Amino acid sequence: MKIFESESIRNIAIVGHGDTGKTSLVSALLYSAGAVNRLGRVDDGTTITDFDEDEIARKITINTAVAWCEWNGVKLNLLDTPGYRAFINDAKSAMMAAEAAMVLVDGVAGVEVQTERVWGFAEQFRMPRMIVINKLDRDNSSFARTLDSVTEAFGREVVPVHLPIGSEKDFNGVVDLIQQKAFLFEGNSGGRHREADIPAELQDEAGARREALIEMVAETDDALMEQYFENGTLTEEEVGGGLRKALLKRALHPVFCASALLNFGPRVLLDVLVQLTPHPLERAPVATIDLKSGEPGEMTVQKKGPAVGYVFKTIADPFAGRISMIKVYGGSLKSDQSLRNARTEVDERLGSLQVLQGKSNASVAEARTGDICALTKLKDTTSGDTLAEPPCRFEIKRIEYPEPAISFAIEPASRGDEDKIGNAVSKIMEEDPSLRFTRDPQTKEFLLSGSGQLHIEVSVAKLKKKYGVEVILKPPKVPYRETIAGTADVHGRHKKQTGGHGQFGDCKIRMEPLPRGQGFEFANEIFGGAIPRQYIPAVEKGIQEAAERGFLAGFPVVDFKVTLYDGSYHDVDSSELAFKIAGSLAFRKGMEQAQPVMLEPIMNLEVYVPEENAGDIMGDLNSRRGRIQGMDVKGAMQVVRAQVPMAEILNYQPSLTSMTGGRGSFHMEKSHYDIVPAHLAEKVIAQAKREQED
């Protein structure tokens, strides 16, 4: 396997909304470059980068896959990323390993929700972007309309370099505004094209578009601006070189045309990727964290110095074990080399380095700065880890994932799967760090949380297919609690005489409410030995255990104070057990008198929506018993802040998606507990009693 120098490597993340043709374009690029011998198709399940069973069945990309080809002596690492909301975080991880993003936009639909999301990721990583308007052969496709959509969304820095020749079914070529040539595509020719003069009907538009392109390129460079003023134009070489510099500075975002399904355009795009996109040494510095001080810093990518690699994705294979995809940020990686994991401070011995072609791989002796490779069976290394030659002084900053938007309770379909769940889920989470797996201490349910219902369903399908663990999904239970609104003064006595040694415990307590969030408080005001000191903890324990079992509906009782102030005992029959029972009896009596009420968790909710949807969102939150706290503006989005009962937003994600056309997102965290309205509390209590009876 050939070893490539850093300057001869390009890492491109293929990103965009779902169903814009990313996987088809990667297949066409690989086929046109001669890396594969046939043009794979998503509908046939034959693409190189969609090889998972779920991906083939659903005809969507679920996991980022890496493939590569060589074009004009340059290695192109292509990262095919998911575009659907449920899996978009995987695209964010992949973009960490790329120097440039190729953003695909559907020629019919224009800019869509996840187009804006991945554009934001690229902004975050200071990543150059080029845009490909795809599917121009489709009915109702329109280059002009789509270009307007892109310009409106991303600004005047969006500049077309291509113009399509023909439209819809007659799309058969492009005009290159830099070279002032037409490239006419030929069907069934392996993506080849022939050069021709610009068609007469496009010459006026091409001239005007070229002039606009030259002006935009000149604006980004003082030397070019002087040249433009002096000569009134720029040469082909000046336009091409100026566009590359502007792309690297993120000052311009060039637009190209294609039909990936027909293999129209990939050969032109291969030239573009080689000529315009940055090599790894030209990327912006990488954010780091100092291991001693925790202070943020930056690392410049360079060939000299110690080896540094970042694990941007992990594949948990039940047969091959853990496969770690690594981007080399410094030095070079070699087989059998030892590197230290910055997180665990444990040395990892690298096995054979692999170059991935979808699910296939080939061994390579060395991966130099900027390249992407894979390693198998690293012991303690997972996604987000930094591997470096010791001593490690920093780690590359990890990807921050948003809080999960939806949770489901999971339980094993059979008893045999009980012990396997934890281990299997941990392996799935190695592949997908945006998943969360927790156990609710109150409801005792195992909760699997993710970015959407589809995300959870696919993860559960993986559990069954990969690890043979079948689980049942259920909506999670709301962790209600109980408390008191009044006071009580009660007497609890436990007396049992059955012949011989009996049981006797007697206590008097006062109960009163505490402020919300104070939990449980116990005060001892016994004087004169009415209850011996050794029995007082038993009274407290009896009360606490009874409070855990609840009174109204079986939910824990919180935020109350008990004062033990009197009682009596028997020299022979009293015991810790007797006073523990007496304490629990006193608690039950006290709850009957102290006006017990239900409490529900209230969530702090932040909803990010386009301005035109803000009114609908606030109306919906009010209908869910929410209290609007305020609104802010964040970029192009409105942020609606509210406090809403958890019970009302367990199903919020589908509703938000429906109201905003998929453009909205939200973040929530637990705020406090508050009293449930009486008419709703009755329903909760009735439901809990039915479940207890069942």
Image (cartoon, rainbow, N blue to C red):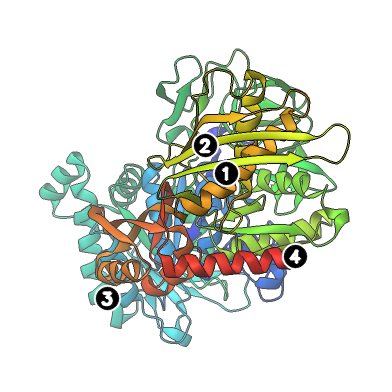
Q: State yes or no: discs 2 and 3 in contact (Cβ < 8 Å).
A: no
Give the foreground label among 2 and 1.
2
User: Which of the pair 105/445 is nearer the observer?
Assistant: 445
In the picture of the structure, the residue carrying the numbered disc 2 is 509
Q: State yes or no: discs 2 and 1 in contact (Cβ < 8 Å).
A: yes
User: Which disc is residue 203 wearing?
Assistant: 3
User: Which disc is residue 53 wearing?
Assistant: 4
User: Which disc is residue 587 wearing?
Assistant: 1
User: Which of the pair 328/526 is nearer the observer?
Assistant: 526
Looking at the rendered structure, the secondary structure element under dot 4 is helix
Residue name at image x 74 percent, y 53 percent: 359
Looking at the rendered structure, the secondary structure element under dot 1 is helix
Task: Looking at this view, name the residue that lies furthest to the left.
Answer: 229
376 on left or right of 475? right
Q: CA distance from mark 4 to mark 1?
A: 57 Å
Q: CA distance from mark 4 to mark 3?
A: 48 Å
Mark 3 or mark 4, which is nearer the start of the sequence?
4
Can residue 441 be seen here? The reply is no
